[in-house]
Structures are given as structure tokens and as C-alpha cells.
Image (tube, helix red, strand yellow):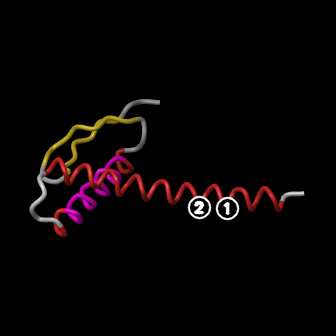
């Protein structure tokens, strides 16, 4: 699989990202990070960029872990239903 390169802007900074996924998916990920950072900055306007980035990472990790837990619970239910 070939690597795709994409120029994105996250919270006012330009980044070149490289991945084996589609450019549209990479853009979706970058947009999610940008939105999360802007959401946190709007609530906490005095935070510097580093703190905004860390809080964004914590929030995104929390979202991921909650979804993973839900997925695991659903998978467990499905496995219990299987004869």
C-alpha cells in the first residue's frame, strides 16, 4: 500500500502528514483534532497552545476509551448470544 502525503492546518499551524490511509480520512482526523483544540480554546481562552493540545489529546483519548469500552461490551454480549 502506498503512503499518502497531505498538507493540513491544525489550530493555525500547517503540518505535512503521511499515512497509508486515504487523504480524505487523514483530513477528517486533522479536522477532528483542529475542532477539539478550538473547542477547548474557546472555553479556556488563556491557555497556551501546548496546554490546549494536551487537553485535546486527553479528551480525544477519553472519547476513544469510552467507545472501546462500549465496543467491548457489545462484543461480549454478541459472543454470549452465539450458541
The one nearer the camera, 21 or 70, is 70
**Coordinates of residue 12 in the picture (x, y in percent):** 12, 52
Label 2 neighbour load within 10 Å: few <14, some 14-19, many 20+? few
Q: Which residue is mark 1?
A: 74
Q: Is residue 5 above or below residue 56?
A: above
Measuring 50% from the left and 59% from the top, which residue is drawn there?
Answer: 66
Q: Provide the residue span drawn in magenta.
A: 26-40
Question: Vertically, is 22 above or below 83?
Answer: above
On-image quarter of the C terminus: bottom right
Relative to 36, is 41 on the left or the right? left
Q: In the rendered image, which residue does mark 2 sit on?
A: 70
Between the C-alphas of marks 2 and 1, the distance is: 6 Å
Q: Residues within 10 Å of mark 1 (few under 14, many from 20)?
A: few
Q: In this image, 51 relative to 73: left or right?
A: left
Quick check: 13 left or right of 39? left
The stretch drawn in magenta includes residue 42: no
Residue 37 forms part of the magenta stretch: yes
- What residue is drawn where x is 42% and y is 30%? 2
Q: Quadrant of residue 37?
A: bottom left
Q: Nearer the viewer, residue 4 or 43?
A: 43
> Which disc number belongs to residue 49?
none
Which SS class for mark 1?
helix
Do the residues under discs 2 and 1 have CB atoms within 8 angstroms?
A: yes
Outermost residue on the left side: it is 46
> Farthest residue toward the right?
83
Name the residue located 16 percent from the left edge and 68 percent from the top edge: 42
Amino acid at each position: 500500500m502506498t503512503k499518502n502525503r497531505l498538507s493540513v492546518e491544525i489550530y493555525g499551524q500547517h503540518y505535512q502528514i503521511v499515512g497509508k490511509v486515504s487523504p480524505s480520512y487523514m483530513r477528517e482526523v486533522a479536522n477532528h483534532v483542529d475542532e477539539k483544540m478550538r473547542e477547548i480554546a474557546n472555553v479556556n481562552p488563556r491557555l497556551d497552545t501546548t496546554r490546549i493540545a494536551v487537553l485535546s489529546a486527553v479528551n480525544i483519548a477519553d472519547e476513544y476509551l469510552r467507545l472501546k469500552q462500549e465496543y467491548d461490551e457489545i462484543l461480549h454480549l454478541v459472543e454470549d448470544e452465539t450458541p
